[in-house]
Amino acid sequence: MIKVSVILPIYNVESFLPRCLDSLINQTLKEIEIICVNDGSTDNSLSILEDYSKLDSRIIIIDEENHNAGYARNQGLKIAKGEYLSFLDSDDFFNENMLELAYKRAKRFDADICIYKSILYDNLTGESRLNTWAVKDQFLPDADVFNYKDIDSNIFSDFMCWAWDKLFKRSFIEENDLRFQEQRTTNDMYFVFSAILKVDSLTILKEPLYYQRRNVSTSLSNSRELSWDCFYKALIKLLDEIIHMGIYDDLKQDFINYALHTCIWNLNTLSDPIAYELFKKLKAAWFYNLGIDNQDKDYFENKKDYLMYLLLKNIHLDDLESYKFYRDTCKDNMDLLVKNKGKIAIELSKNEMLTIREIFDELTLVK
């Protein structure tokens, strides 16, 4: 019996693929299959896969034209036979007992999902440090197994929407017909959060087992300008699913807070001119479509996110000078704008439209 099917999308990772594969074929859990989906690599990745497949019969190669990681994961799902599923990234590497510990934990509590900790590995320096924010277990129930209804905090902030730090029961995924969005980036947000909201049993493994490689120049995260709207498509698909499940009223505030944070983070970390295009989309329609508009300040948990939203809403679409002032001055000085233990320091009436400079000046003058 195959206990875990590992699904590994691969695209031009020849520098990192051997270490990734070594950490998989040497897993202490032996009853695994390693489904490698070559997503149209133009480097030596496919040759490396073929060499490794001669050494280990558990390696299965699917060779495709280039689509995206979401498509590749779905192709792997079609042939997976394991009791559980593991979706990994091919530029990362893993503790050799990762799959064994996660599988045993999931089996012990008959969990649909097992989530484990990760380590941030700096590709430039070789330094490693524990990731303390991907799983915020300090806000989770003190129980071996639980589901989202047992969580009092914001579920979208307690976990990251990554698939790679989670083990999923295959029967659960198939029964709920869950698939990844087939887009270049943010293809796992819908899959992961839909799964977490649907499961009856979720368990947490506190050991750090996954090494996520950071500061990789070829990483998709460093070229998000090519797929800058994918995060919005993911949020909208997740919103539609929450509404379809009939749980939007319960999760509305949590989702809106998560959506605002995701919008602001993407805007602030993209480069112009793409960031400017995103600003115009957010202001013209996307803030409204996600339910962010028309909420008062007390609705938002993250006051810095709310203040940036407030500033952005007061920039006219054709006011490039104010937009540049936000980019150059405001977004990196939000700590100055949050006063009185996190409470918003200024009230704006609905009919009052100040310039962004006036808002910034008034906020920073508050003692």
Image (cartoon, rainbow, N blue to C red):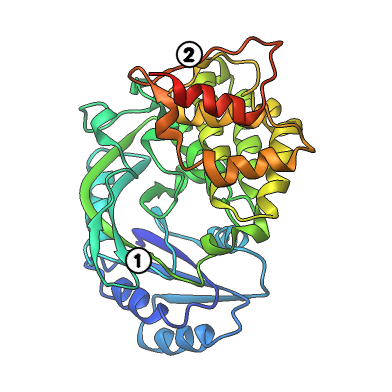
Q: Position of residue 196 (x, y in %)?
A: 44, 35
**Location of residue 124 with respect to 231 vertically, above or below:** below
Q: Residue at x 26, y 40 (%)?
A: 204
**Quadrant in which residue 324 is drawn:** top right
Q: In the image, what residue type sits under mark 2?
A: Asp
Q: Earlier in the sequence, mark 2 or mark 1?
A: 1
Count residues near mark 1 (Cα–Cα under 10 Å), then give few for <14, some for 14-19, many for 20+.
many
Depth order, front residue of 342/289: 342
Question: Above or below — where is 186 with respect to 357?
Answer: below
Locate residue 160 relative to residue 262 in the image: left or right. Answer: left
Q: Is residue 168 left or right of residue 145?
A: right
* Closer to us: 293 or 139: 293
Check disc 1 and report its element: helix, strand or loop. Answer: strand
Q: Nearer the viewer, residue 328 or 122?
A: 328
Q: Quadrant of the C terminus?
A: top left
The location of residue 31, given as percent across then percent down, is: 31, 66
Of badges 2 and 1, the one in the foreground is: 2
Q: Is residue 79 above or below residue 143?
A: below
Q: Residue type at mark 1? A: Ile
Tell me the crowding category of disc 2: few under 14, some 14 to 19, or many 20 or more residues within 10 angstroms, Cα based.
few
The circle drawn on residue 333 is: none
Tell me which residue sits at (66%, 21%) in the image.
354
Quick one: 168 or 9, which is closer to the camera?
9
Estimate the x, y position of residue 153 in percent, counting from the top left: 36, 23
**Which mark is drawn over residue 298?**
2
**Alpha carbons under labels 2 and 1: distance apart:** 49 Å
Identify the residue under disc 1. 32
